[in-house]
Image: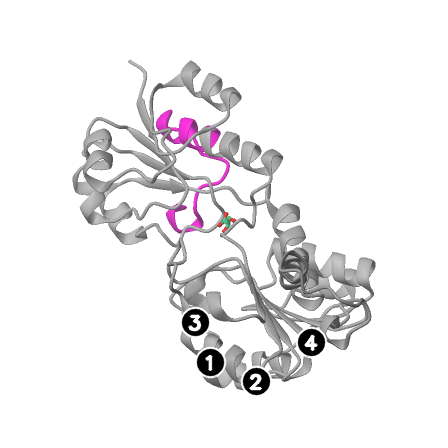
């Protein structure tokens, strides 16, 4: 008998066709996130689960007695309670690599959009405020030839560094758990301690995965080290920074601006204080969201799960599950 798989979002037809060859499918294709009680009901008979951010914890696993694998259509897997999954013998897979260049493009969208105030000035025209073109009130700051600090130098960090150095002739520093000698030699990026990186650069880009070690890594003290003109970009996870401290820094003007794709609470509530600040550019967690990349990620996730359900080694097993 084919294994049974539940998928809590829409997936491309090609991915469905592939999955149907190997599994029976149950899909949630509504626009709203599946409510918890309905999710638990659907998982009751599932051998595999494809999601893109649902928290996988002991409570969920208790409702899914047959579950063998959870495949997330994301590179980040901080929504996996690894210990709980290991205890139940449920494997987790994710989708790195395929999204690197797309997320790097998004980092640059946030850098350029914040520096040149793209969204703010679009609103300015729509509000009928465009009276003259050369007003200083329209000025931004340069990205080309500026100094860029990257926190978290994985594959995406390297893709950002490549764009920065070869496309924008920027000077690039990075901070990472371990030195990336190959990247240093290949691109001319230099390693810096966190405090030095924060103080030195015009743009600081946060790309670390969310782990116990990176939770709240950037707080009041760290933001206080940044230049008053510097722009802070977060494309990692909301919880890697102290959001309240960032809001204070943006309000007080102790940093120049921010570009954010990730937040502590997603979707961002309608009354969130960030929405009232003009010097922050906000995106709804769309780092990897191009049609091509998301379709490819869905296929990678499907292949990962089929491998798990067939007792084979999936291409992208989350490293913590490797024996
Ligand atoms: C991921 O895949 O983890 C990204 O945050 C998606 O944009």
Alpha carbon distance from label 1 to label 2? 8 Å
SS at mark 2? loop
Mark closer to the chain start, 4 or 2:
4
Residue topped by disc 4: 202
Taking the image as drawn, is residue 323 in sight? no
Residue topped by disc 1: 248
Query: Would you say the residues marked 1 and 3 are in contact, meaning their CB atoms lie under 8 Å apart?
Result: no
Query: Would you say the residues marked 4 and 2 are in contact, meaning their CB atoms lie under 8 Å apart?
Result: no
Mark closer to the chain start, 1 or 2:
1
Alpha carbon distance from label 1 to label 3? 9 Å
**Apparent side of residue 87 relative to residue 91 in the rendered image (left or right):** left
Alpha carbon distance from label 3 to label 4? 20 Å
Residue topped by disc 3: 243
Query: Would you say the residues marked 1 and 2 are in contact, meaning their CB atoms lie under 8 Å apart?
Result: yes
Residue topped by disc 2: 254
Query: Would you say the residues marked 4 and 1 are in contact, meaning their CB atoms lie under 8 Å apart?
Result: no
Q: Is 305 a magenta residue? A: yes
**What quarter of the picture does the N terminus occupy?**
top left
């Amino acid at each position: 008998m084919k294994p049974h798989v539940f998928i809590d979002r829409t997936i491309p037809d090609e991915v469905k066709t592939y999955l149907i060859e190997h599994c029976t499918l149950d899909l949630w294709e509504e626009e709203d996130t599946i409510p918890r009680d309905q999710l638990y009901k659907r998982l009751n008979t599932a051998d595999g689960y494809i999601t893109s951010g649902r928290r996988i914890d002991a409570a969920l696993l208790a409702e899914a007695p047959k579950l063998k694998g959870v495949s997330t259509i994301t590179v980040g897997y901080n929504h996996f309670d690894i210990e709980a999954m290991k205890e139940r013998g449920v494997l987790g897979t994710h989708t790195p690599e395929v999204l690197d260049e797309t997320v790097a493009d998004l980092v640059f969208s946030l850098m350029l959009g914040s520096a040149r105030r793209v969204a703010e000035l679009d609103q300015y025209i729509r509000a009928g405020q465009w009276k003259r073109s050369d007003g200083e009130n329209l000025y931004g700051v340069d990205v080309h030839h500026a100094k860029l600090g990257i926190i978290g130098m994985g594959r995406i960090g390297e893709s950002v560094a490549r764009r920065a150095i070869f496309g924008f002739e920027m000077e690039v520093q990075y901070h990472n758990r371990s030195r990336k000698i190959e990247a240093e030699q290949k691109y001319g990026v230099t390693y810096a301690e966190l405090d030095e990186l924060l103080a030195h650069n015009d743009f600081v880009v946060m790309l670390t995965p969310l782990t116990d070690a990176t939770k709240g890594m950037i707080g009041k003290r760290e933001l206080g080290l940044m230049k008053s003109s510097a722009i802070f970009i977060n494309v990692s996870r909301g919880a890697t920074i102290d959001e309240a401290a960032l809001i204070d820094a943006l309000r007080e003007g102790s940093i120049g601006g921010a570009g954010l794709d990730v937040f502590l609470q997603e979707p961002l509530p309608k009354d969130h204080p960030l929405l009232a600040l003009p010097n922050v550019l906000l995106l709804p967690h769309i780092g990897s969201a191009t049609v091509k990349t998301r379709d490819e990620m869905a296929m990678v996730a499907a292949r990962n799960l089929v491998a798990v359900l067939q007792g084979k080694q999936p291409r992208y097993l989350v490293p913590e599950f490797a024996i």
